[in-house]
Amino acid sequence: METTSKNERHGYFSSSLNSICFSVRSLDLRWGEVCLLVKQHLFDILVLGEVGRVDFALMSAALSNHNVFYQSGENAHGGVLVMMRKDISAVRVSCSLPSICALDLQFDQTIRLIPMYAPESKTRN
C-alpha cells in the first residue's frame, strides 16, 4: 500500500501500513489476547474475524486512539471488526452482505480495504 503521509506513532515517513488479521472465534473469550497484540505490536489496522458479540464501550475505553468499524455476521459467532488508528482517514463503503466491512482509506490514492469472514459452509457468487 503506497502512502506518503507521516506515521506519527513511529516518527517517520512511511510507504506501508502495518496490519494484523486475527480470527478470534469470540471476542468475549479472546479479549485478553487482543489486548496483548495491541500492546506488543505497533499496528495501523487490526482486523478481527468471528468476533460474535462486541462491547463497544469497552473497546472505546481500551483503544481510545483507534476508530472501530463493525459488520455483524450471519450467526452469533460471525462478524468482522476493524480497528484503525484515528489519524488514518477511512470512509465506510455501503455493503449489504453480512461479515464484510468495506472501507476506503484516504491517502494520495484511495485504497479499498475489504476484510471479511466467510466460513467454509458458505459460498458467495
Image: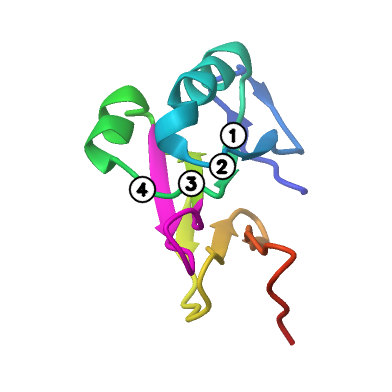
| Distance in Å between CA atoms under marks 4 and 2 | 10 Å
Instruction: Work out whether 121 lies above or below 24.
Output: below
Residue 30 on image: x %, y %: 50, 28
Q: Which residue is mark 2?
A: 25
Residue flagged by tag 1: what amino acid is it? Asp
Instruction: Work out whether 32 lies above or below 28.
Output: above
Disc 4 crowd rating (10 Å Cα; few below 14, some 14-19, many 20+) is some
In this rendering, the count of numbered labels is 4
Residue flagged by tag 3: what amino acid is it? Val
Disc 2 crowd rating (10 Å Cα; few below 14, some 14-19, many 20+) is some
- Which sits earlier in the primary sequence, circle 2 or circle 3? 2
Residue flagged by tag 2: what amino acid is it? Arg
- Which sits earlier in the primary sequence, circle 4 or circle 2? 2
Q: Secondary structure at mark 4?
A: loop
Residue flagged by tag 4: what amino acid is it? Arg
Q: Residue at x 42, y 57 (%)?
A: 76
| Distance in Å between CA atoms under marks 3 and 4 | 6 Å
Q: Which residue is mark 4?
A: 53
Q: Residue furthest front?
A: 121
> Which quadrant: the C terminus?
bottom right
Q: Residue at x 77, y 49 (%)?
A: 1
- The image quadrant of residue 36 is top right
Q: From the viewer's perspective, is the residue at label 1 or at label 3 nearer?
A: 3
| Distance in Å between CA atoms under marks 1 and 3 | 19 Å
Q: Which residues are magenta?
A: 66-80
Q: Secondary structure at mark 1?
A: loop
Residue 116 on image: x %, y %: 63, 61
Q: Which residue is mark 1?
A: 44
Instruction: Work out whether 15 lies above or below 113.
Output: above
Q: Left or right: 64 with respect to 93?
A: left
Q: Residue furthest left?
A: 57
